[in-house]
Image (cartoon, grey):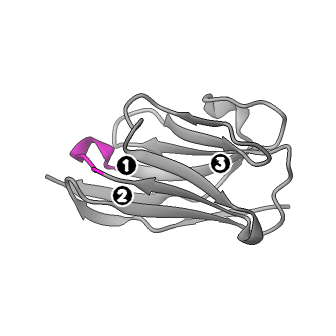
Amino acid sequence: QVTLVESGGGLAQAGGSLRLSCAASGSISSSYTMGWFRQAPGKEREFVSAIRWSGPNTLYADSVKGRFTISRDYAHDTVYLQMNTLKSEDTAVYYCAADRGWTFSTSADKYDLWGQGTQVTVSS
């Protein structure tokens, strides 16, 4: 059973950067889609970005497009989310997730493996 562990969250100033990491405890299959979601207080969990483990395809929410970049490291079974030009509205708990089927989705319902989350706070 693969488990996901996020790290890299913390406090940043508006306009600054953070890089989140999601390390898998086991090998990530080529069929996986790896995603990042976030949940702010009082709000529903929302999609941020996703990447196919075996191909070049990526997805981004409109709110982060051009500021965030998702990437992967095959050697370390790790997914990254580089977050630049941070805004106060990016403040949330960020979750890494895996969709172990062959879908490539922005819907949280398709993801069946989740990390514990890491807090990102952006001060304005």
Q: Which residue is mark 2?
A: 120
The residue tagged with tag 3: helix, strand or loop? Answer: strand
Tag 2 secondary structure = strand
- Determine the secondary structure under disc 1: strand
Question: Is 40 situated above or below 23?
Answer: above
Please name the residue shown 84% across and 37% down the image.
101
* Disc 3 residue type (three-letter): Ala
In the picture, measured across the screen, residue 62 lies left or right of residue 24, that is left
Residue 10 at x, y = what percent? 35, 67
Asked where in the image residue 109 lies, by quadrant, the reply is: top right
Task: Give the mark nearest the N terminus, 3 or 2.
Answer: 3
Height in image: 89 above or below 10?
above
Residue 92 badge = 1
Where, quadrant-wise, is the N terminus in this rendering?
bottom right
Q: Residue furthest left?
A: 124
Q: How many marks?
A: 3
What amino acid type should be assigned to the residue bearing mark 1? Ala
Q: Residue 4, percent across and down?
A: 68, 61
Magenta region, residue range: 85-92
